[in-house]
Image: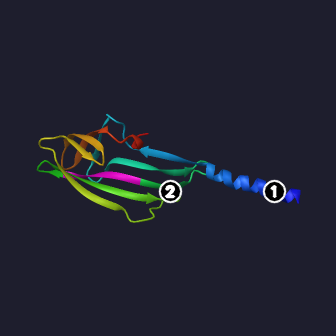
Amino acid sequence: MKIIYISFLFLSLLLCSCGLANSQYITNNFTIGEQASCNVGSVLVSIESGIKNDVYGWIVSATRQELVYGGIANNIVRISYKEYQVNREGAFIRDAFNQNVQYDISKERNITFRNMEIEIIDASSNKITYRVINAPNGLVR
């Protein structure tokens, strides 16, 4: 009986410790204050945050947020916001959430989306040069 109890206790501790191997993570493709550029249809800003299993390297669950450059016309910059849910296989487990926004940069070169401030240095119909000025604390690694 004692051996069964010890075996059960060991197995319980082993299973519980698997949950302790999970940790929060965040990744992004920018550095605050650093100039960057991308082409039309490319990602300006990408942020992924979630929980991963440190033992196996699996992504348990995560959210990926992206701002995609859509071009400029008459000083109006077009940007698309996309949001994905990611599972451990990396597959998107639901349809992406999309929002299209436009900014008039004729007078103000700084734009803000969801508390992230971006300075537009130069924009053409093919390419944008920008700098992330400010991002919420939890979104910067």
Q: Is residue 73 left or right of residue 117?
A: left
Tell me the element at label 2: strand
At label 1, the amino acid type is Ser
Q: Is residue 27 left or right of residue 102?
A: right
The residue sitting at 42% across, 65% down in the picture is 94
Q: Is residue 87 above or below residue 118?
A: below
The residue sitting at 49% across, 58% down in the picture is 90
The residue sitting at 51% across, 47% down in the picture is 24
Callout 1 crowding tier (Cα within 10 Å): few <14, some 14–19, many ≥20: few
Can I make out residue 55 in this image? no
Proximity of marks 1 and 2: CB atoms separated by less than 8 Å? no
In the picture, residue 135 is in which quadrant? top left
Can I make out residue 131 in this image? yes
Q: Does the magenta segment cover residue 70?
A: yes
The residue positioned farthest toward the top in the image shown = 33
Precedes in sequence: disc 1 or disc 2: 1
* Residue range corresponding to the magenta coloring: 64-71
Considering depth in this image, is 134 or 39 the residue closer to the camera?
134
List the residue tagged with mark 2: 61
Tell me which secondary structure the magenta stretch mostly adopts. Answer: strand
- Residue 48 x %, y %: 43, 50
- Residue 4 x %, y %: 84, 59
List the residue tagged with mark 1: 7
Q: Is residue 71 left or right of residue 5?
A: left
